[in-house]
Amino acid sequence: MRSRQPNRLREIIRQGDIALGSCLYSFSPALIELAGFCGLDFCRIDNEHAWRQDQSTEDVLRGGLLGGLVPLLRVDRDNPYLIRKALEAGAGGVIIPHAKGKADVQRMVEAAKFHPLGKRGYGGLCLSGKWGVDAGEEWMDWSNREQLVIPMVEDVGALEEIDEIMATNGVDGIFFGPADFSISAGVPLKIWHEKVVGAVKTIVETADKYGKFVIYPIGFPQWEQVERVKELGVHAVELGHDVSILKSVWQKSIGSFRSSH
C-alpha cells in the first residue's frame, strides 16, 4: 500500500518557492487533471459561487488527485458538515470564505481537525481514508497535519484581527480575496489601490511571523502582473479561473479573425 505523502502545496512553500495554482469553476474533472499535468501545484475548486452537489464535487477532487496537484475546496460557508465532507472526499484542504476573526477560524479548525486540535467526527469509509483500508490513527494524524485549513480574508474587520487569526493553532494559511476586500475598504474592484496592497503586505508580514502562508489570486492574463505580485511577497499565486481563461482566449481569437476581414 502506498504511503501517505506530505501536502505538496505546503512543501513547495517551505522550500522557499512560490506555489502556482488555478481555480476551477466548470467542475470538469478533465480540466483539473489537465491543470495538474501542466505542472500546477494546486487548484481551488469553487463551491461557493459555482455550487455543485456531492457527487460532482467528489469526481473533481479525484481528478485533481489523478493530475498530481493539491485540490482545495472552497466551501460556501463555514458549515461543519461541508468542511468534513470535503476532507473525507479527498480535498487537500478547505478554503472558507469571509472569516471575520478568531472565533470564526477557531470554529473552522474544530470542524476540520480531529481531536485534540478539533472536533471532527470520525468516518474512515471515504476516499481520504482509502475506504477503510488505511483509516486508523495514522490517517487521523496525517489529516490533522496535511489537510489544510485556509480561511479567506475578504473584509476590513478581519484585517484588524489578523494577528489573532494567524496565531490560531490549526490554521495553515490565508487566502486573500482582493475583490471583496476592495469593496469592504470602500474602493470597489480597485485591487491595486494602496488600501488593498497595504492590507496584503500586512497579512504577508503576519504570516511570516507565524510560519504560515498567503495565497493571492490574479486574473487573466497573469503574465502582465507577475512582477507586481512578486513584490507583494505572497507564498502562492492562483493564476485565474478556467472559465475566465477560456473566455479571454476565445474572445481574443474571435476578435483577431473578425478584425482581419
Image (cartoon, helix red, strand yellow):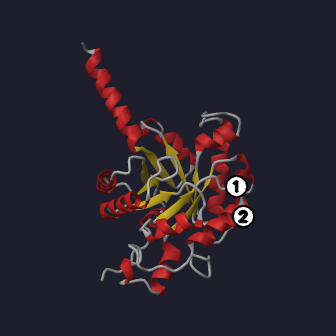
Left of 186 or right of it: where is 124? left
Q: Amino acid at mark 2?
A: Ala
**Mark 1 lies on residue:** 100
Residue at point 29% right, 27% down? 253
Q: CA distance from mark 2 to mark 1?
A: 8 Å
Indicate the quadrant containing the N terminus: top left, top right, bottom left or bottom right: bottom left
Residue 251, percent across and down? 35, 28
Left of 46 or right of it: where is 27? left
Which label sits on residue 87? none
Which label sits on residue 103? 2
Indicate the quadrant containing the C terminus: top left, top right, bottom left or bottom right: top left
Q: Amino acid at mark 1?
A: Lys
Report if residue 22 is visible in the image: yes
| Marker count (numbered) | 2
SS for dot 2: helix
The reply to whether discs 2 and 1 touch (Cβ–Cβ < 8 Å) is yes
Residue at point 64% right, 43% down? 181
